[in-house]
Amino acid sequence: MPSQGMIVGDNWLAIAAAAVGFYAVGFIIYGAVFSKLWMKLSGYAKEQLQPHMWKMAISPIMPILTAIGLAIILKLARVDNLAVGLVLTFQTWFFIVLSTRLYSFVYSPEKPGLLVMDAIHLFLGTMIAGAIISAWP
């Protein structure tokens, strides 16, 4: 059993790097490469988003929480190598992250393309974060 206070492991730098990696994936997908596609799929015009821009200030919280959660899971599973870490990270994405994301799709008039875009973002971000945490020395 891990000692109290050490549930996520000894390396908060790995968690920070994992959160940055996850956030970078989102920036690339939604900000740099596919921003127009996201706007089209979500049905928003730029003007409609202006009153909600304050939410961007809290957006780093999501990848930080994801990185901490993955660190806890990987630590409790005693993952000590990249291959096992990636398998467990994939299972976490598939059975928890993706299944949770499906709720918005099933219970809203959301377009399938937005689900696909978000699923890709969450997959790549989760896998990168899990890889960083698993491989960190």
Image (cartoon, rainbow, N blue to C red):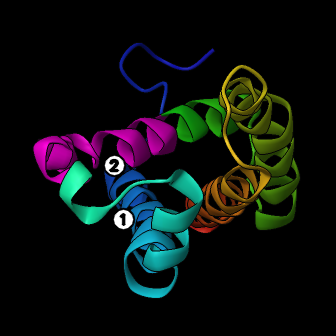
Badge 1 crowding class, 10 Å Cα cut-off, few under 14, some 14 to 19, many 20 or more, is some
Closer to us: 71 or 96: 96
Residues packed near mark 2 inside 10 Å, few (<14), some (14 to 19) or many (20 plus):
some
Q: Is residue 130 left or right of residue 69?
A: right
- Describe residue 22's horizontal placement relative to residue 122 as left or right: left
The amino acid type found where label 2 is placed reads Trp
Residue drawn at the location 73% of the way across and 33% of the way down? 105
Q: Residue at x 41, y 35 (%)?
A: 65
Q: Which residue is mark 2?
A: 12
Depicted 101 relative to depicted 22: above or below: above
- Residue beneath the point at 67% across and 66% down: 124
Residue 1 vs residue 19: left or right? Answer: right
State the residue at coordinates (86%, 64%): 83
Q: Quadrant of the N terminus?
A: top right
SS for dot 1:
helix
Residue 137 appears in the picture as rendered: no
| Up/down of 34 relative to 2, above or below | below
Q: Is residue 16 magenta?
A: no
Relative image position of residue 26 (x, y in whole percent): 46, 66
Q: Which residues are magenta?
A: 49-68
The numbered mark, 1 or 2, whose residue comes first in the sequence reads: 2
Left or right side of 62 for 57: left
Question: Mark 1 = which residue?
Answer: 20
Residue 53 drawn at (x, y percent): 15, 50
- Magenta stretch containing residue 66, yes or no? yes
- Quarter of the rendering occupied by the C terminus: bottom right
